[in-house]
Image (spheres, rainbow, N blue to C red):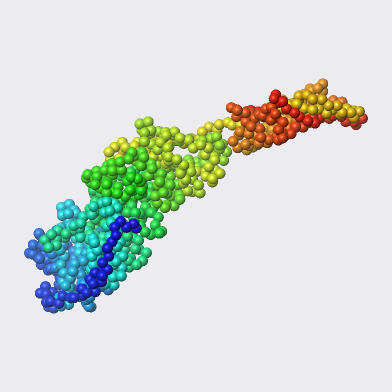
Amino acid sequence: MKTYLPIIRQIITLFIISFFILTLSCSDDPSSPKKEDEDPLPEETVTIGVEGGTVEKGDLKLTIPAGAFDEDYNISVSEVEDDGAFGDNAVTPSYKISGIPGDYSKPLKLVAKYSGDLSGKSYLGIGQKSLDIIEESSSIVFNMYEASDSIGYLVSSIPASISPKNLYKKNEITNFDFFPVFATGYAITNSIHFKFVFPITAIQQIVNLEEMFEDAYSVVEDGLQVLINEEIYRLVIVKQNNKPMTTNFESKTLNGENQLFNIFNINQNSLTNEEYYSLQVKATQELFSFTGWPETNNYISEKKIFEGHSWIEFAIYCWIEDLVNGDPNYKYPKNFFWEGMESFNGFNQKLNDDENPVPHGRGMSALIKYLTNRDPLKIAFIGKFIKNNKAPGTLVKDFVESIDLPSNDWWPGYLKELVNNELFELPDDYFISRAHAEWDINSAEDISKILTHTYQDLSAKMFKINLNYPDLEDTQNLKFKMIGPENDKDLSLILFSINNNKPQYIETTKLAEYEIINPKSYFSNGTGEFLAVLVNSNLTQDDYLGQSEITLEISVSQKVKTILDYKNCFFSSSLMGRYENKWADGSLHYWDEPFGIGSFNFIPGEFTGNEFVGSLTFSGYLNVATAITELTITAVISENKDEIISFEFTKVTNFNNESNEIRTEKVIGANIPLYPDRDDLFRINGLDVCNDEIKYFYEDIFYSQDGGENYVKIIEVGCTDESKLELFFAE
């Protein structure tokens, strides 16, 4: 946890206080129950009015002075099972006092017979039920009042209460319960801003506890820049507890003055175990709560009162866990996993007075983290917002105005970081598995999907696209079109690919139409899925509860034909050749003349990947004889389609004449570039036609009737400026 101010420890004072305040009061007290009062047992319930009175149960006596009540009340006292709150430090049974009005005006006196020996300081613990709205659970939280010893009895009093007048509407709560128990063996110490009441056995842990609370104080006042009321009395009580920390707020009259109490009950065992991290968090959260801005506890009644509360209060409260948590295993605020999709429902939430704003606030704690991470806001944004808050009814509006940035900047920016797991460490597939709709692209027929929904102001919806179509071409794109109010104003689209069930950010766009170019290319990375988040940043109402109908059209673009779709190839070459002619008598004759090897027809075939294979057989009348010609060609095109990497052309002609003539022509070559401004023609010219990478073969064999053989073949090639070689592809 970050420490904002140095904490001055006064360890020497702590030990002095702990071990030298053991003097016990030993005077006669006429208010102590007399022996004759002990038998028979007193009544458990007594009606007491303005004149005052007493109620007794076992060894406990409650005295209500005259004028404490303004009318008659039925006051009952009963012994209850000890919940172990004070462990071995408890020296009396535990009791329950019921029927006390919320606005009693004079201190109430309690006397109880104790057992065992007293040590250190003795206290009266007065428990009251407190409902934690965040946890949706109640606990008994104790305040501690010093008690004195009176010949086997402990004596103390409960100050007059003003709580209901401050915290509740008139007549909303008429009475409540006290849970008294006396305890001994305690000591006290003070830090800069807190008073600590603790068992002497916990003395070794108190220094760390002081530092933790002072750090929490510094986080709230110096970090968040939320002013803490210095007139509030902050009491930390260490005892046995069923939770690491429980809290309450009380308003009492002491020495004629109203005194506000922040009460923290700490489980002594939590000071030395793994729950210490939760103490750090709770101390800061509750201290922030006790600034009086968000009230996270309903102090007196177990009734769930949400009227006047906003989710923003609880969003900040829950975010504080992220701010100060020192647990190395921390991943996200408590229970955020169940509320992480709240942001998509809308920034604001309309609630009835009896509806719980905590779930939405918990889910929106991620927004608080995003904003307080941003420049120039940082965590001081919290204090800025609270200062700007004009009234409880304007919390949401004041919050947005305090951000002081365009909504189409911070709202999509926040959702991008949320889904991309930049804010909390959620499971990789958390948002993927919670998409609002899915579209499966299984075949060439799956070309479009229209998704129309109602969006609240500052909300979003998430869509998953599954590319299950393996024959998708690299020329086909995934297209998105947003259609919304006012010419698609303030709409954003956040796009992710999905790799191994984990979102990977692609881009955020505010363009109404956008394309993912060549989604097929993502397949090589193991990606066949995409996530699209349509973000509505429109503000149509001041309360951010306006609604707009927005459509997202997703489509696969039509297949664009490329050279790889072509089915025909034409080959030709022209250059000079030196011919060698062998006659029947064995003599050799030579001459030079231009020659060409070519298909003279388109050769049908097709591409498999980047390789074209074609063949053609035809017959005709050639050189005063019929002939059958067989053409074959293979050509491999580069990935960029700008070069023939390799090719082989073969032409074999069988003549039906007296000499059974067979003519074989072949060209093998490589690296033939694409002709400028064309996507279907590959050509070289001039002297390049005779480069070392191209081989030419021409041979014409004639067979005589007596079995002899003569031939014409090219034994050498040459090139001029007019020479050329080309491969031309066509549909």
Relative height, residue 375 to residue 98 (above, below): above
Q: Looking at the rendering, which quadrant does residue 712 occupy?
A: top right
- Residue lying furthest top in this view? 624
Q: Which residue is painted at 15% across and 63% down in the image? A: 159
Q: Position of residue 70 (x, y in %)?
A: 9, 59
Q: How many marks on residues?
A: 0
Left or right of residue 409, residue 441 in this image: right
* Image coords of residue 554 (percent x, y): 46, 36
Q: Nearer the viewer, residue 55 or 406?
A: 406
Q: Nearer the viewer, residue 185 or 384?
A: 384
Q: Quadrant of residue 155?
A: bottom left
**Where's the C terminus, which quadrant?**
top right
* Horizontal arrangement in the rendering, residue 639 relative to residue 514 (left or right): right
**Residue lying at 23% horizontally and 72% vertically, measured from the top left:** 16
- How far across and how far down the image is residue 262, in percent? 22, 59
Give the residue drawn at x 31%, y 63%.
244
Quick check: can you spot residue 355? no
The image quadrant where one finds the N terminus is bottom left
Residue, x 43% and y 40% (percent of image)?
Answer: 508
Query: In the rendered image of this protein, does residue 612 appear above or below residue 12?
Result: above
Question: Is residue 20 something one can see in this rendering?
Answer: yes
Using the image, determine if residue 295 lies above or below residue 629.
Answer: below
